[in-house]
């Protein structure tokens, strides 16, 4: 047993130091990025934000909407082959969709069926998603996936440490998925004691992944998955070196999100739950096995309306961050950013007042 004594940081532990800027307007900021990849020969251009592959977030409706912003939606893995086939009849933006699967044999069998239907060309991304990317078995399934889909852009995780980010990239992942226990609907830290503060995980894993390069190809990349509570958290993830940011709760609760719409005392809510929660296990697998704990919670979050409104707000916030740092492009965030440790991020002195009455 040993104790690491250096402090690890979450998004709310820091603020970004403003710097002299020559920008005249937020509209001058370019939020699109172009990536080449370590394994895939594809090139991707867009705004590198991904809707999480949760069934309350990664829906067909979300994909249609976010594709208009050149964002990506990781479809949840519980759509069947016929549903996927029907969706792609009139959706032809492969740069905007990730097919998701786990490591079970049934998941790989379904992927083979999808590929046999000729649907592989309909999506450029594949997300191999497991809660614990540290299992040696996962690395083996990643190699199997790379062999099965040699030219797709593969996202794989989740991990939170530099050596495992390297392990995933070296074994076939173009993008390592970073984050354990930080999601708002996740209880892994409470149930298991396992986790890693998200900002430090992003900084350390991005440094490791970016160090793996091939001549005339890209380097290893990462996606920060979870822990984003405010739009500012997304900016901080990019400043910390994340190439992509995956969002769950921030995109939940909208018209395009999954989950049942509930009305209580005249107010509307939408269902949102972690994919390792008892509810998710019972819904998709019939029961929660007695050898497993529930590592997620079920929530009712206020109904938020059309997701377009939130997306426009998020992109506006990122452009504003850029003007404070003097970054003309999203690519410059990590080069321009200086983090400062804070004891308090927000002034909450008026929270005791009910501002809705004014």
Image (cartoon, rainbow, N blue to C red):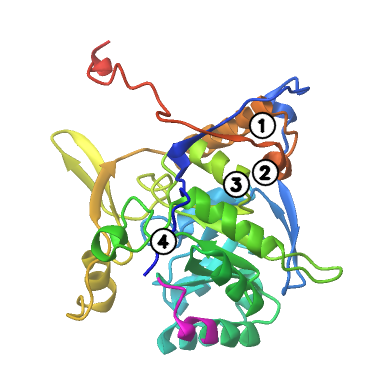
**Residue 297 in picture, x, y percent from top left:** 24, 57
Task: Determine whether the residue tagged by mark 3 lies in a helix, strand or loop.
Answer: loop
Q: Quadrant of the N terminus?
A: bottom left
Which mark identifies residue 240? 3
Which residue is at a point 65% across and 58% down the rendered structure image? Answer: 207
Circles 2 and 3: CB atoms closer than 8 Å: yes
Q: What residue would you read off at disc 2?
A: 334
Task: Give the extent of the magenta segment.
Answer: 132-140
Which residue is labeled 1 in the image? Answer: 322
- How packed mark 4 is, by other alpha carbons closer than 10 Å (few <14, some 14-19, many 20 or more), is many
* Element carrying mark 2: helix
Foreground tag (1 vs 4): 4
Callouts 2 and 4 close, C-beta under 8 Å: no
Residue receiving disc 4: 180
- For the residue pair 7 and 320, the one nearer the viewer reads as 7
Q: Earlier in the sequence, mark 1 or mark 3?
A: 3
Which sits in the foreground, 10 or 182? 10
Q: Is residue 50 visible?
A: no
């Amino acid at each position: 047993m040993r104790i690491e004594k250096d402090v690890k940081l979450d998004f709310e532990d820091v603020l970004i130091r403003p710097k002299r800027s020559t920008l005249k307007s937020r509209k001058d900021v370019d939020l699109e990025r172009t990536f080449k990849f370590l394994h895939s020969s594809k090139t991707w251009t867009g705004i590198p934000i991904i809707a999480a592959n949760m069934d309350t977030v990664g829906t067909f409706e979300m994909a249609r909407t976010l594709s208009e912003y050149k964002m990506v939606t990781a479809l949840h893995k519980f759509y069947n082959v016929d549903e996927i086939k029907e969706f792609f009849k009139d959706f032809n933006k492969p740069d905007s969709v990730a097919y998701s699967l786990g490591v079970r044999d049934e998941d790989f069998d379904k992927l083979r069926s999808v590929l046999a239907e000729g649907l592989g060309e309909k999506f450029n991304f594949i997300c191999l998603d497991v809660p614990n990317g540290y299992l040696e078995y996962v690395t083996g399934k990643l190699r199997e996936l790379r062999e099965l889909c040699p030219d797709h852009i593969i996202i794989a995780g989740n991990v939170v440490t530099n050596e495992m980010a390297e392990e995933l990239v070296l074994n076939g992942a173009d993008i390592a998925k970073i984050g354990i226990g930080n999601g708002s609907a996740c209880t892994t830290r409470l149930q298991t004691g396992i986790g890693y503060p998200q900002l430090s995980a992003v900084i350390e894993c991005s440094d490791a992944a970016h160090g793996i390069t091939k001549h005339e190809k890209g380097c290893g990349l990462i996606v920060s998955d979870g822990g984003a509570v405010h739009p500012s958290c997304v900016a901080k993830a990019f400043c910390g070196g994340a190439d992509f940011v995956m969002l769950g709760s921030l995109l939940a609760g909208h018209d395009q999100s999954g989950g049942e719409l509930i009305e209580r005392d005249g107010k509307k809510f939408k269902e949102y739950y972690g994919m390792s929660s008892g509810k998710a296990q019972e819904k998709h697998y019939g029961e929660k096995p007695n050898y497993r704990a529930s590592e997620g919670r079920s929530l009712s979050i206020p109904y938020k309306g059309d997701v377009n409104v939130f997306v426009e707000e998020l992109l506006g916030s990122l452009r504003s961050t850029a003007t404070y740092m003097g970054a003309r492009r999203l690519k410059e965030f990590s080069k321009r950013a200086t983090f400062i440790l804070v004891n308090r991020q927000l002034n909450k002195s008026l929270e005791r007042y009910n501002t809705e009455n004014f």
